[in-house]
Structures are given as structure tokens and as C-alpha cells.
Image: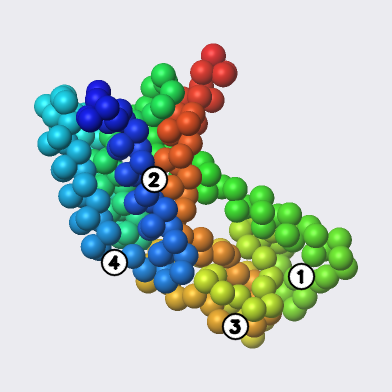
């Protein structure tokens, strides 16, 4: 597929990467992304479709990729990620539908499933941070009356921050005693913690996981399918 000598696949991938880079920077700095970004790159998707050499074939591919739209909207409404993340996935499906630079199988959900797998990484970062604190003789559970199991779970979910920023509190008072709180934090309604020296779980923008999931899709493919291939 050529357009003025440029491979259309690379144009689509480049547009997707530029959109994700801008969105990630905005979300990290402001924790908010203006809808004009999605409108602008939605227009880019339309232009790429119109000027492409095989618009009808690409339109069918985009239509299949749009299965991500209802899924992303439902996940948003349940609060697992924000509206910006949902719109990002939808526009990305129009910009680079089921695209990979590797000859591997990619589904409309690949970016999302890759992102979900990558989002597990902070658990191990938290664990490493907590183990370093414990090895430094810090009593990170000072003032808590908790079971050993809850403490182990907390090691993965969060950490004790002296000056939390863009994080959600993991503490609550029960009968005047501090307890760990593993409750669900709604992506758009939960407020960031401002209490000093408290247990928190980091509020990492999900757009970053989506960006990484897309990059993995482009250079590798589907992490789940790749794992199954290795097993078989």
C-alpha cells in the first residue's frame, strides 16, 4: 500500500504513536486531555482512509476494529479507566486498525490486552520499593494492626509515601485504629491523597499503558497469543 511512495502502514503507525505521545505527556502533566486531541486525530484517520489506495478494504478493517468501542465505553463507565482512555482506544482503532509490523495475528483487542498485562508491572515496582525500605530498617507498617496476609498484599499494591502526589490513599480508620484499605478507586471520581506519611497506591495514567501496549503490538504483536504460541 503506497501513497506518494510512503507505505500507508507506516503513516498509520506514526500517526498513532504521535497521538499517544501527546496524550501521555498531557495526562502526566495535567491529568487531563482535551477532547480536541481525539477530534483532530479522528480527522487524520478519515484523511488516511480517503487517500489510501484501498479505502473499502481499510474501511472493513476499521469496522471490525471498532468492536473495541463498546468494550472501552463499558470499562470507562465502570471506572476502571477514564474517558480519555476510552476515546484514545476508539480513535486508535481508526488510525491503525489491527496493525503490526510483524507477520503475527493481531486482534481488535490486542492494544487493550497488552496494556492490561503491562499494567501489572507497578505491582513489582511497589514490591521492590517496599523491600528496600524494609531492608533499610524502616517500619513501613508502624501504627497498623493488620494481618500478615494484608501486609503482604499491601507490599504489591502500594507503598508508604512521605509526600504523596497523584496517588490514592490506602488507609482508613476503624474504631480509631489505622487499617489498610484495598477498596476500588474509580478512575474519574476518586480524589488524590494529600496526607503526609501515608500508604498510597500510585495513580498512574492508564494512557501510558495503552501507549506501551500499542508499541508492543507494533514491534511484537499480541502478548497473549505469543505466550500461547510458546506454550504450544
Mark closer to the observer (3, 2): 2
Quarter of the image for residue 197 reads: bottom right
User: In this rendering, is residue 216 above or below 41?
Assistant: above
Q: Which of marks 1 and 2 is nearer the N terminus?
A: 2
Q: Earlier in the sequence, mark 4 or mark 2?
A: 2
Mark closer to the observer (4, 1): 4
> Residue lying farthest bottom?
176
Q: Residue placed at 67% from the left, 57% from the top?
A: 126
Residue that badge 1 annotates: 140
Q: Is mark 4 on a helix, strand or loop?
A: loop
Residue 6 disc label: none
In space, the residues marked 4 and 1 are separated at their CA atoms by 39 Å
Residue that badge 3 annotates: 195
Say which quadrant the C terminus sits in.
top right
| Label 3 neighbour load within 10 Å: few <14, some 14-19, many 20+ | some
Q: Is mark 2 on a helix, strand or loop?
A: helix
Q: Is mark 3 on a helix, strand or loop?
A: loop
Residue 17: x percent and y percent? 39, 45
Amino acid at each position: 500500500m503506497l501513497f506518494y511512495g510512503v507505505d500507508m502502514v507506516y503513516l498509520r503507525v506514526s500517526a498513532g504513536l504521535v497521538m499517544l505521545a501527546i496524550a501521555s505527556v498531557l495526562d502526566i502533566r495535567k491529568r487531563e486531555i482535551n477532547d480536541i486531541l481525539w477530534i483532530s486525530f479522528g480527522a487524520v484517520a478519515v484523511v488516511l482512509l480517503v487517500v489510501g489506495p484501498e479505502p473499502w478494504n481499510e474501511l472493513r478493517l476499521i469496522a471490525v476494529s471498532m468492536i473495541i468501542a463498546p468494550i472501552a465505553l463499558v470499562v470507562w463507565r465502570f471506572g476502571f479507566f477514564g474517558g480519555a482512555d476510552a476515546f484514545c482506544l476508539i480513535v486508535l482503532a481508526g488510525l491503525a486498525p489491527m496493525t503490526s509490523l510483524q507477520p503475527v495475528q493481531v486482534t481488535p483487542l490486542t492494544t487493550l490486552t497488552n496494556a492490561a498485562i503491562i499494567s501489572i508491572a507497578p505491582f513489582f515496582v511497589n514490591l521492590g520499593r517496599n523491600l528496600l525500605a524494609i531492608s533499610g530498617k524502616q517500619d513501613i507498617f508502624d501504627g497498623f494492626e493488620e494481618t500478615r496476609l494484608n501486609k503482604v498484599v499491601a507490599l504489591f499494591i502500594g507503598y508508604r509515601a512521605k509526600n504523596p502526589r497523584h496517588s490514592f490513599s490506602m488507609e482508613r480508620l476503624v474504631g480509631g485504629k489505622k487499617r489498610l484499605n484495598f477498596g476500588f478507586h474509580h478512575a474519574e471520581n476518586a480524589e488524590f491523597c494529600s496526607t503526609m506519611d501515608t500508604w498510597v497506591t500510585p495513580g498512574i495514567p492508564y494512557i501510558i499503558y495503552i501507549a506501551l501496549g500499542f508499541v508492543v503490538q507494533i514491534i511484537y504483536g499480541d502478548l497473549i497469543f505469543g505466550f500461547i504460541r510458546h506454550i504450544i
